[in-house]
Image (cartoon, coloured by chain):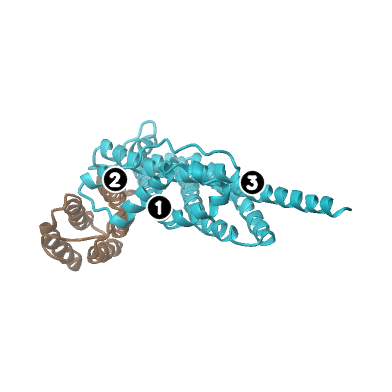
Chain colours: A cyan, B brown
Amino acid sequence: MPFRNRLLAVGLAAMLAGCVNLQAISTYAESAAGVAGATDAAKRWRDSDKKLREQRLDGDVCPIGYTGRLPQAQFDAAYDDAEKLHQAMSAYFTALGELASDQLPELAKTAAPSLEGIKGAGAKVSPEEEAAVQGLFALLRRGLDAYRHKKLRELMTSSHGDVARVLGLMRKLADVYAEGLRGERIQAINFVKCEIGQSDLGDKYLGRRELARVGADYDKALSAIATYKAALQKLADDHDRIRGALAMDRDAMTRTLKAIAATAKELDKAHDAVAKL
Amino acid sequence: MTDTTLAYSADELVQLAKALDDMAEAMPVGAPGPDGLAAMQWCQSLGGAAQNLLLMAQRDYLADTTEPLADIVVTTKEATAALAKIKAIDKIVEVVGDVMLLATVIWLQKWNLVLPTVKELRNDIRSV
């Protein structure tokens, strides 16, 4: 083979390898955007009172539902703030994926999230966390077309701290949602127990079946939230791995990114599980 | 912990909500007759209080305050453990009533009422 052809073959192989590698990031980022943007757990927490009351039984004698719970509007507002965080993270991963696929990424359309609502409620917001949210957004708005795939590593390096912080924040929120659901499970189960206590013997058998059914339903939902929380951790880890891989030689990068493509499937599963809440 | 500027972290609010939910779970709601119904009503109030603390935690998840609610969490956990030993519903109502009041003053941020309420709760647990 003439030298020129050999050079061409090597060059072509390198180009193909380059495409495949970055395509892995692109595939991964799509899954990452999906799971980071998922607000299903937050929504389920917001709607807890309504969902609990749906557990009512025909002819029941026991009361059901939280008493003394703050007005629903406050839970709605809290959800709206959480949603903005999710949108920002999702937009970030989408942009990453578009960069990797060598398309011109769209500018983030979402408005910068405001933590004013949270602060207005008298709560303290740490300046680092607020800066992380704002920083992430500033990065997205800076005009992502400047960050074509050659700049991918720079982007990931500069955003890494903020991404990790916001994902950490989202994991903390997942704990809040999980406890909310566990509390709701306790209410629903105790309601059935109360009904059994008030009923005659004939109803008790049916009551126990109802008890098992309600418990199993909630266990499934709690497990989905746990899977979702684990996926957020994976997301933070993978962000670091991809960033590291972009600094490696081509073979090492290919191996690392292949492994990352496999975890994208796990993220999809977590997203599907939480979407069924 | 001082009278007027009690500080807390969002993590501790979640812990406290857990303790309230655990207490709700421990209520003898299966008791026949009015005792069971009364227990269920307290269970609902504890559940509502836990939800409010979670809302506060959610809003406050970024709180960087240092003074923990650890004392209150520990006391609430002690109260839950004590519940298992109590048979009479009226004694349960006394302790649960204290816990409810405690949760309420926390979400209303009436810090000056927290210490007296904790003290009252401790007394009630001791008398069980």
Foreground tag (1 vs 3): 3
Q: In the rendered view, would you say A202 is above or below A264?
A: above
Judging depth in this view, the residue of B115 and A229 nearest the camera is: A229
Q: Amino acid at mark 3?
A: Gln
Residue at screen point 55% across, 44% down: A99
- The residues tagged by marks 2 and 3 sit, at their Cα atoms, a distance apart of 35 Å
The x and y percentages for residue A169 are 38, 53
- The residues tagged by marks 1 and 3 sit, at their Cα atoms, a distance apart of 25 Å
Q: Amino acid at mark 2?
A: Leu
The x and y percentages for residue A14 are 72, 52
| Outermost residue toward the bottom in this view | B126
Side (left or right) of B90 relative to A129: left
Q: Can residue B55 be seen here?
A: yes
Q: Earlier in the sequence, mark 1 or mark 2?
A: 2
Residues at circles 2 and 3 in contact by the CB criterion of under 8 Å: no
Which chain contains the residue that carries disc 3? A
Q: Earlier in the sequence, mark 1 or mark 3?
A: 3
The x and y percentages for residue A91 are 46, 42
Q: Which residue is mark 2?
A: A115
Q: Amino acid at mark 1?
A: Val
Foreground tag (2 vs 3): 3
CA neighbours of label 1 inside 10 A, class few (<14), some (14 to 19), many (20+)? many
Judging depth in this view, the residue of B102 and A259 nearest the camera is: A259
Residue A23's disc number:
3
Q: In the rendered view, would you say A117 is above or below A166?
A: above
Numbered disc 3: secondary structure: helix
Q: In the rendered view, would you say A64 is above or below A28?
A: above
- Say if labels 1 and 2 share a chain: yes
Residue at screen point 52% across, 39% down: A105
Residue at screen point 79% across, 53% down: A7
Q: Which residue is mark 1?
A: A166
- Say if labels 1 and 3 share a chain: yes
